[in-house]
Image (cartoon, rainbow, N blue to C red):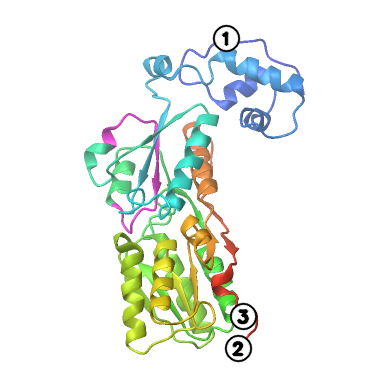
Amino acid sequence: MGEKAAPTGPVSAGRATISDVALEAGVSKATVSQILNGKGRASEATRAQVIAAAERIGYGANPIARSLRTGRTGVLGIVFRPTDAISGSLHGTEFHIRIAGGAAASALSLGYGLLHVPDSMRMNDIGYPMDGCVVVAPYGSDTFLAELRRRGMPVVSVDPDPDHLEANLWVGRDELSATKKMLDHVAAQGARSTVLLAITDDNAWRRGFESGYRAWCEARKLSAQVVEVPGMAGSEGARQAVARLLDEGERPDAIIGATSRFAVGAAAAVSQAGLEMPRDVMVAALSDSELARSHTPAITALDLHGDALGKEAVHKLVRMLEGEVSVSSQIMPSLRIRGSSLRGAKR
């Protein structure tokens, strides 16, 4: 482990970082990070050594006292850009709730509080006291995200600004691969014609999944049909959109809803038309929730791992505040196959 430096006591200039704890304890930054986050296989002696070093130099000290000494608040902000991200049914917004939960748990484990900025459309909200901010699902050329950057606020986004991919650090999903996985599944169940119920919000999530859908159809020389439904319209908006399609004589083999609410609405329209799911029409969603899991039959959906995205966004933000370098990254959604898309045999 090497020779340990003499204890230095509380850091008097600037906020104590993981690097300071590592120097004080005589171990690597990686070891400190693992121990403080409850990970790794360090011995109990090393854990005690690191925790004692952190206490000596004031790492994770009382946030009010620390803010008076350093100008830091010990608080991170989180902003949800989609118009229906948090309002309304918690079932329908499970993805965003999971992001918030993962971010809060991560912030707490790293010694920070988490502040939900209530109205991201007001520039005055940027004045909330926070050391850095997580912005969830920014729009194309997002004005709020751009203003944060202009003011020098450290920021990490869950999904990039789709018009400015390199403008800031972000964590997102591999929408192209996830969409292919979903569509390959319904094709294996006999689907030849599909409809995508796309949300109208102009963000990387919508653009990524729609691009993946169109690319998949083009590669197979199949017709791509995209029907836009406002997010706030929810399941009823999707039901009406699908009912119109069915009334016009169109009967796709599979309907893919951008959200679980859209999928539930599509399923209702299918049933009201006297059709059976999945025999006549398969239904799936590009975002999982309890609405999909509890539906009869249960609806096939992509688990977007919102909790993991929230945790990773906060970890990237804290590493940024501590002067460490991170890179943008993606995670892979998981396909949860359920009864709404299982025909049992190919047609």
Q: Which residues are magenta?
A: 126-142
Q: Which residue is mark 3?
A: 188
**SS at mark 1?**
loop
Q: Is residue 84 visible?
A: yes
Foreground residue among 287 and 4? 287
Task: Kindly indicate whether the residue at mark 3 contacts the one at mark 2 (C-beta within 8 angstroms).
Answer: no
Residue type, label 1:
Gly
Q: Is residue 201 visible?
A: no
Q: Which residue is mark 2?
A: 347
- Which of the two labelled residues, at mark 1 and mark 3, occupies the earlier sequence position? 1
- Which of the two labelled residues, at mark 2 and mark 1, occupies the earlier sequence position? 1
Q: Is residue 174 above or below residue 16?
A: below
Report the Cα–Cα distance between label 2 and label 1. 72 Å
Name the front one of labels 2 and 1.
2
**SS at mark 3?**
helix
The residue sitting at 31% across, 68% down in the picture is 237
Position in image of residue 6 (x %, y %)? 67, 10
Q: Which residue is mark 1?
A: 9
The residue sitting at 54% across, 25% down in the picture is 17
Residue type, label 3:
Ala
**Residue 325 among magenta residues:** no
Task: Kindly indicate whether the residue at mark 1 contacts the one at mark 2 (C-beta within 8 angstroms).
Answer: no
Position in image of residue 71 (x %, y %)? 37, 21
